[in-house]
Image (tube, rainbow, N blue to C red):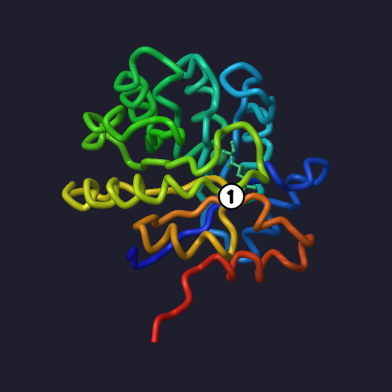
């Protein structure tokens, strides 16, 4: 099991009319990263946040901005997200013909690069990239919307990725996204995840609940 599990609230479930306050509130409540879902209405059937919103949020928080791009093509928009303040940029290998080039581009601009596996995407799709990336993000729902049900079959993929990543002599984060809540978080961490994305489970109940919600996702101390 990972020593330290980080929680990355997805602001897709935040109140968009008060986004700055929401980002500040999750920081105060103990979030480790801010997960920002970028959707283009084409690679996925939803349309969300662009670089201008990321730039507007940047002064509000010192936490790492973990930008999950669900857009195609990826490369033309990478510089705008780095300029806006993204610390980590993850993308889907299906979104363009040359994922390794996209990794090189992201890293050449000084950000960390992540690659995302959809539920139907095999590990083999990214295996050749594992030595060059900073993060793998396993989707436990199909991308596009918050509030979907966790897909159990992905636990085995997380376990197999953990074993592969443990053989690499540099740190590569293993992040999991979709349907994470108090019930599913434990299984995901036991399978080897070290970063948990949570939208619905963070923001449910409003700001007074955020600290409790985030704490509830962390692994309980073992006796
Ligand atoms: C889905 C996004 C997720 C989403 C998670 O495409 O990548 O980050 O916000 O939402 P929950 O935690 O509600 O499943
Ligand atoms: Zn996401």
Q: Nearer the viewer, residue 31 or 204?
A: 204
Q: Residue at x 66, y 49 (%)?
A: 60
> Residue 114's x, y, as percent?
39, 36
Residue that label 1 marks: 179
> Residue 6's x, y, as percent?
47, 59
Q: Residue at x 42, y 15 (%)?
A: 96
Say left or right for 118 vs 173: right
Up-down relation of residue 207 to residue 223 (above or below): above
Say left or right for 204 vs 114: right
Residue 125 placement: quadrant: top left
Q: Nearer the viewer, residue 59 or 111?
A: 111
Up-down relation of residue 61 to residue 69 (above or below): below
Q: Residue at x 29, y 46 (%)?
A: 161
> Residue 199's x, y, as percent?
64, 50
Secondary structure, mark 1, is loop
Say left or right for 25 vs 84: right
In the rendered image, the residue lying farthest to the right is 17
Say left or right for 215 vs 49: left
Up-down relation of residue 99 to residue 19 (above or below): above
Image quarter (top left, top right, bottom left or bottom right) of the N terminus = bottom left
């Amino acid at each position: 099991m990972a020593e330290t599990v980080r929680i990355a609230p997805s602001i897709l479930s935040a109140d968009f009319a008060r986004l700055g306050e929401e980002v500040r509130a999750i920081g105060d409540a103990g979030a480790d990263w801010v997960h920002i879902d970028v959707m283009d209405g084409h690679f996925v059937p939803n349309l969300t946040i662009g670089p201008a919103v990321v730039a507007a949020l940047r002064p509000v928080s010192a936490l790492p901005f973990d930008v999950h791009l669900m857009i195609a093509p990826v490369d033309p928009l990478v510089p705008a997200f780095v300029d806006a303040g993204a610390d980590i940029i993850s993308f889907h290998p299906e979104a363009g013909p040359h994922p390794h080039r996209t990794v090189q581009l992201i890293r050449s601009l000084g950000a960390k690069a992540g690659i995302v596996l959809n539920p139907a995407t095999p590990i083999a799709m990214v295996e050749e990239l594992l030595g060059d990336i900073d993060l793998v993000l396993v989707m436990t729902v199909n991308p596009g919307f918050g509030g979907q049900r966790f897909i159990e079959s992905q636990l085995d993929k997380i376990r197999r990725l953990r074993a592969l990543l443990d053989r690499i002599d540099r740190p590569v984060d293993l992040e999991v996204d979709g349907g994470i809540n108090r019930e599913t978080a434990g299984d995901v961490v036991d399978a080897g995840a070290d970063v948990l994305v949570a939208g619905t489970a963070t923001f449910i109940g409003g700001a007074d609940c955020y600290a409790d919600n985030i704490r509830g996702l962390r692994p309980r101390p073992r006796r």
